[in-house]
Image (spheres, helix red, strand yellow):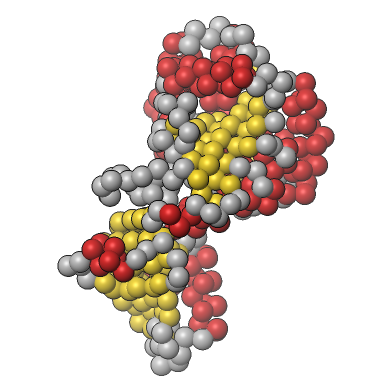
Amino acid sequence: MKVFKFGGASVKNANAVKNVVTILSSTLKNDKNNPLIVVVSAMGKTTNLLESLVDAYYQSKPTQTIVDEFKSFHLNIVDELNIKDLSNINITFQQLAYKLSLPHSDNYHFEYDQIVSFGEQLSTKILAEYLNQTHLKATWFDAREVIKTNNKWREAKVNWELSQTKYDDILLPKVRENKIIITQGFIGSTLTNHTTTLGREGSDFSAAILAYFSNAESVTIWKDVPGMLNADPKYFKGTVLLTKISFTEAIELAYYGASVIHPKTIQPLKKKDIPLYIKSFIKPNEGGTAIQSSTKYDAKVASFIFKPNQVLLSVTPKDFSFIIEDNLKDIFAILSDENVRVNLMQNSAVSFSFLIDDKYNLQQIITHFKNDYLVKYNQNVELLTVRHYDDDTLERLTNGKQILLEQKTRQTARIVLG
Ligand code: ASP
């Protein structure tokens, strides 16, 4: 059993969907009796569009223009693919219309999950219908039947034990009967069957979850890049492909911000020693990156991760107290309440500094601190992370720039540049 994951870019239009089918077809030709679970994201930029729909719905503004755009985008693809049976696809449109006809609850995050999940429902229905018109027969499966989560809307936590049971009871028999299962990334459901999502870009994680439950022999994430590069070509010249790296290395790189895979993806695979391949859907015959258990190849190439648009905040207790556990507890409670993800932190005796993406409501965060802390911040700073660094390289990269903060371990250097 193998698990494949196709992201939004790989199903962004009719030709892209046809390309997915070519990849599936040639995989099955070479590996006839091996079933595939195919995890699919929403098509193209659909999730962003649905986010604007959630906003409109929640603010009780007109939603029709956005719904029309959502429908026509998908129906154009359906039309170009010459899909004849629209009944399943139309049910999804009707369900969305019904949801939008109801008054919204007071919980924005809840409403977000109920609406944004329509992107994945539709993309998988379109792909499954199209596959069923070819010689490849596919079974559409609702991932929410298996991926059971808590109700932390938009960042739901998986209930691994219950989901494993659901997998064994519901999906496994289908996998045994069918060569291709088409299912959604990104979505799950609570015990009371309300839809949840696993965080933006969470479909990679869904693929890893299903691979874990099914003890898959491998996972392949198909991307529009040749694999995992040692740096983002947008920011660095002369990038190289990491052909083989360890799970640990991949976790570190993803955690530090290498955006090729979702950081949560690796842990479940590492636990069961299931290799992860990252390959190009444009050049499917090329090798890509293999992420596996051996650490032998990790230090061969230095990797660079650059995060622009950062804000560095420093908070100092007004009562002259030291930064000790009590203060840290308060600080983290504020950050957790605001759903802020910290990219780097450091403390001295009297201040605590942390770096965050410039996407949060900064004034709101500052307001929480203002009573008890003096707050200073620098906007527009950059975070550079170098794995397997050497001093000459660091010198070259930081030359002429203002270093605001620096952290080094044996393998990793992290530098905040002004
Ligand atoms: N469609 C979701 C997103 O765009 C999940 C995913 O693609 O991984 O974030």
Dividing the picture into quadrants, the one containing residue 182 is top right
Residue 329 vertical placement versus 191 (above, below):
below
- Judged left or right of residue 301, residue 404 is left
- Judged left or right of residue 295, residue 317 is left
- Judged left or right of residue 41, residue 345 is left
Dividing the picture into quadrants, the one containing residue 342 is bottom left
Looking at the picture, how far across and down is residue 229, in whole percent? 39, 45
Q: Quadrant of the N terminus?
A: top right
Q: Farthest residue toward the left?
A: 400
Residue nearest the viewer, comparing 358 with 211: 211
Q: Farthest residue toward the bottom?
A: 320
What residue is drawn where x is 73% and y is 37%?
A: 214
What residue is drawn where x is 55% and y is 45%?
A: 291
Looking at the picture, how far across and down is residue 187, in whole percent? 60, 39
Q: Quadrant of the C terminus?
A: bottom left
What residue is drawn where x is 33% and y is 61%?
A: 384
What residue is drawn where x is 68% and y is 52%?
A: 271
Residue nearest the viewer, comparing 189 with 60: 189
Q: Is residue 45 visible?
A: no
Looking at the picture, how far across and down is residue 132, in whole percent? 62, 12
